[in-house]
Amino acid sequence: MEWFVAPDYWLSRLVFQRALAVVYLVAFLGAAVQFRALIGERGMLPVPRFLARVAFRDAPSVFHLRYSDRFFAAWAWAGCAVSVALIAGLDQRLPLWGAMVLWLVPWAMYLSIVNVGQTWYAFGWESLLLEVGFLAVFLGNDEVAPPVVVLFLLRWVLFRVEFGAGLIKMRGDSCWRELTCLDYHHETQPMPGPLSWFFHHLPRPFHRVEVAANHFTQLVVPVLLFTPQPIATAAASLMVLTQLWLVLSGNFSWLNWTTIVLALSAIEFPATHPRVAGPPLWYEIVVLAVAAGLLALSYRPARNLISRRQVMNRSFDPLHLVNTYGAFGSVSRVRHEVVVEGTADPVPREDSEWKEYEFKGKPGDPRHWPRQYAPYHLRLDWLMWFAALSPAYAASWFTGLVERLLENDRDTLRLLRRCPFPADAPPRYVRARLYRYRYTTWPELRETGACWHRTYVREFLPPMRLEWVDQSR
């Protein structure tokens, strides 16, 4: 069936697959490095405790069979190894069925991690990586040309990512309709990047242009993905440029990068494609059957798009095969940060020497300039932003964080930029305070060298000692 394949997209497939393998590598690397403090046996939200109350059918994962920190570490590092093999092009050296199995491995491995990750893995880009990764299984290798139906499904995902984000903005906050959201967003976003301060200080008329351009890219351009070439290529290229702009303006894990990877699959790169044999019948049957199943599962995400009660970043099945996406349906006007401090004094007082813990990505010391971490995901830093929005977001894990700081837990301290206490002398008490943060002005920056100015708001958590934490658990 000549209609089944699109030979002109063989280079698009190659670029897409290698780039997706890089995203997989980043995801597995983050899991391997951070899991012990977050979901390990002695983590803030231990996997064994989660598995005791959740059935396999609700959260399919290999860890239902067995869990230990050593096994999880081996699993995550094995995922890194598979990702490196895909980056190196091992799938092209295998027969078609072998390449499909190889691409299935990181998807199944990362699904096992996400489904036990709980709050730490409740982000839209986890489901996005899994949905895109599942489609990559059926793209084939150099033995066959890329299947048209899989390329279409990749565009369908890209459409839902962009169009869903555009709709959630228009429905969620009046500032998007008034073109004023970027007056606040660069300052209040979850984890600013090194250029976010400068983006915030761009002229307000330019912010209006930014918002208008965002609406055009998310509400108009996605429709053009389903038009003939070269219009589809132009639309996908515009999405790539928009996502690169977002990469420069903040740290959004691999959300922007996965969107770029998706857009690359829709670009028809000028290249001479090799002559390949027609796809085997079994491959055509498998691809068409999977495509039919995914289209059937798309009903609920599609209905969500047109619903007045649209939800964002929702998975409708435990395998994360077809999901709904969206971000920043509402934009905070004021930035709050939870600042965690400890003291070695035997009795905590206001005049005690309280020393501040420094996180890697989230704002803390006003003089500490944000760094670029994306596509790497600092999970604790992101959840600290949510904690500042409402203590309810931190109810399940914040006490565990305090307990581990009181113990000078090595794995937890590795998630931080700086611990103010020596390894053999943990603090007697730990407390948390809520501050309002704002970017400094140009004159303030020149005078103080600080990119942030902060003002104390209220107590977030009173001074706690280890014995009290143990009794409250």
Image (spheres, rainbow, N blue to C red):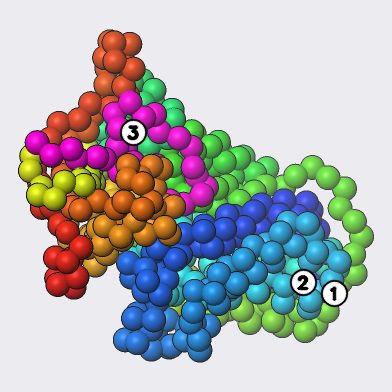
Tell me what residue is drawn at x 42 percent, y 57 percent: 410
CB under 8 Å between discs 1 and 3? no
| Image position, residue 328 (x, y; %) | 31, 47
- Mark number displayed over residue 99: 2
Q: Amino acid at mark 1?
A: Pro
For residue 151, which quarter of the picture? bottom right
- Magenta segment, principal secondary structure? loop
Judging depth in this view, the residue of 177 and 223 nearest the camera is: 177
What residue appears at the point 16 percent right and 46 percent down from the top-left corner? 345
Q: Judge whether residue 300 can be spotted in this image.
A: no
In the rendered image, which residue does mark 1 sit on? 95
Query: Is 60 drawn above or below residue 273 in the view shown?
Result: below
- Against 472, is 341 above or below? above
Q: Nearer the viewer, residue 447 or 343?
A: 343
- The residue stretch that appears in magenta: 351-380
Residue 369, magenta (yes or no): yes
Q: Which residue is mark 3?
A: 186
Q: Earlier in the sequence, mark 1 or mark 3?
A: 1
**Where does residue 143 sit, x and y in percent of width and height?**
86, 68
Q: Is residue 110 left or right of residue 311?
A: right
Q: Is residue 53 left or right of residue 455?
A: right
Q: Amino acid at mark 3?
A: His
| Residue 250 found in image quarter | top left
Amino acid carrying mark 2 in the image: Ala
Q: CA distance from mark 2 to mark 3?
A: 42 Å
